[in-house]
Amino acid sequence: MSAVAESNVVGNSGCGFAEYPIFRKARPDRTVEDILADIQHAADLPLAQGIPLPAEAYTTEAFYNWEVENVLRAEWLCLAHRSQIPNPGDFLNIDILGEPLIVVHGKDGQIRVLSRVCPHRAMDIMPPGFGYDGHGPADAREGGAGCGHTRLFLCPYHHWSFELDGSLKACPEMQNAEGFRRDDYALTTFRSELWNGFIFVNLDGKAGSLEANMTDLTSDLAGWDMSKMKVVIEREWDCPFNWKVLIENFMEPYHHLGAHCRTLQPLMPAKDTWTSGERAHSIRVNTPLKEAALSEMRQQYADGTTEGFPLIPTLPPEHQVQWSAYLSYPTFLLFGGPDRMIWYRLDPITTDRSRLITTTLVNEEALAAPDFEKRKAAAEKMMIDFHLEDMEVCTAVQRGFYSTGYRRGRLSHLEMPIWLIERYLAARSRNTWPTYDRPAAPSQR
Ligand code: FES
Ligand SMILES: [Fe+2]
């Protein structure tokens, strides 16, 4: 298993799951209007009559482009957690939806999301490979590709330099350019907001406030106090499937029965899971720990044999006996347990390709534990093991969507999140959000 895990880390060539070719043209494209009408129809069915999204929603380039404009660029996307850039001058280079970005901790303490595209002649001011040949004054920093520390940004093409707030600091040999004013040539700042330590960007600049979107998750997740947590595990995966394949897979617990029959199903059986009532901006799925698993866990904590992190004492009782999965539309994914928070950062790239960064956050107490490294290694192994199971099914499902042999199925009640995602997409096509113009679907409990 671990050999396969290594092959999925970006930087190593080849993905073990991508060996089967995709024949993209087997299924003909449909028009965007046609696909949206189909999604609206599926969203209007009651869950008991529910059907999955049409295959073309995962295979049609024009539909992907519709999603980029109306969903992905129009909503809040999570880029980073503050613990990844703790000090002034720390920055992260992140490319998302074709935008090369810098997430930077400014000298004034402000976190900003800047474009990496130079306003002179469009050079990427820190092209990939940064750190190998020294891009100006920036130093590479521990934490992975694109992680750095600097006092200013320097475009390697003609050496224009920029302050950490994006303003143009200096530009050589521009004294003969008539009417040229340095103030007019800052790096573009994208709209960003912080929530619980997580840094979000809204690329089209027109979304409502992030805080308002997060009202439900703020109360669901208060016990973890995530603003004080730190990202301690990070792994990047090259995913040969559409972004919705991943969010659907992350959110529906029905597949514990099959894909995770040896890992998650014995701990969190599918039949015990339930989905909270419909919300405008998020989904919450509850995956209770089986009684036997719970008593074993308690015993291991009592006798000191646990491989888990210290239990989080501020969690309310319900979160001490279950894990819960959250999607804040469109791509922010969390899976919280009694001792940690798992966060997936998902970057859609094309119709059938995405980049995924799987991370784990823990609190100060976990970091201070003497055997932290051992617990971290166990947590990393667990995450890889069950994510490999997800990679396999997601990769095969994308291939299935291209096949003309696929007949659209039906949904189990345990797949309520799939139906809620359809209702979200349908609402976006009506230029609104779920529950705004339709009654909210009730909780399964
Ligand atoms: S393109 Fe950046 S300085 Fe010329
Ligand atoms: Fe899964």
Image: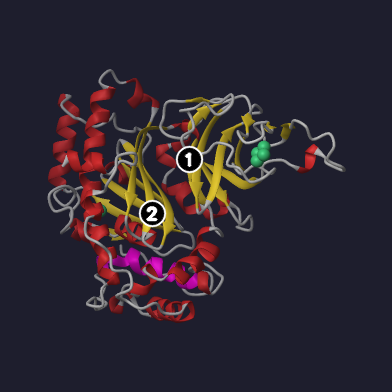
Q: Position of residue 1 (x, y in %)?
A: 16, 42
User: What type of secondary structure mainly makes up the magenta span?
Assistant: helix
- The residue that appears at 44% across and 78% down in the rendered structure is 40
Query: Dot 2 surroundings within 10 Å: few (below 14), some, or many (20 or more)?
Result: many
Foreground of the two, 428 or 35: 35
Residue occupied by mark 2: 354
Q: Residue furthest top?
A: 370
Mark identifier at residue 80: 1
420 falls in the magenta region: yes
Left or right? Give the position of 85 relative to 108: left
Q: Earlier in the sequence, mark 1 or mark 2?
A: 1
Instruction: Tell me where the magenta segment starts and ends, as one range.
Output: 413-427
**Whole-Å distance between the Cαs marked 1 and 2?**
17 Å
Residue 119 lies in the magenta-colored region: no
Residue 32 appears in the figure: yes
With respect to residue 94, does 442 lie above or below?
Answer: below
Position of residue 303 in the picture relative to residue 121 (left or right): left
- How many neighbours does mark 1 have within 10 angstroms: few (below 14), some (14-19), or many (20 or more)? some
Q: x, y (%) of residue 301?
A: 20, 29
The mark tally for this picture is 2
Asked if residue 200 lies left or right of residue 244, the reply is right
Q: Quadrant of the C terminus?
A: bottom left
Residue 410 position in % (x across, y down): 25, 75
Where is residue 310, by image quadrant? top left
Give percent across and percent down for residue 222: 44, 42
Q: Name the mark on residue 243.
A: none
Between 163 and 374, the one lying in front of the other is: 163
Q: How is the image coloured?
A: secondary structure
Q: The residue under label 1 is which amino acid type?
A: Ala
Query: Where 332 sits versus 367, above or below?
Result: below
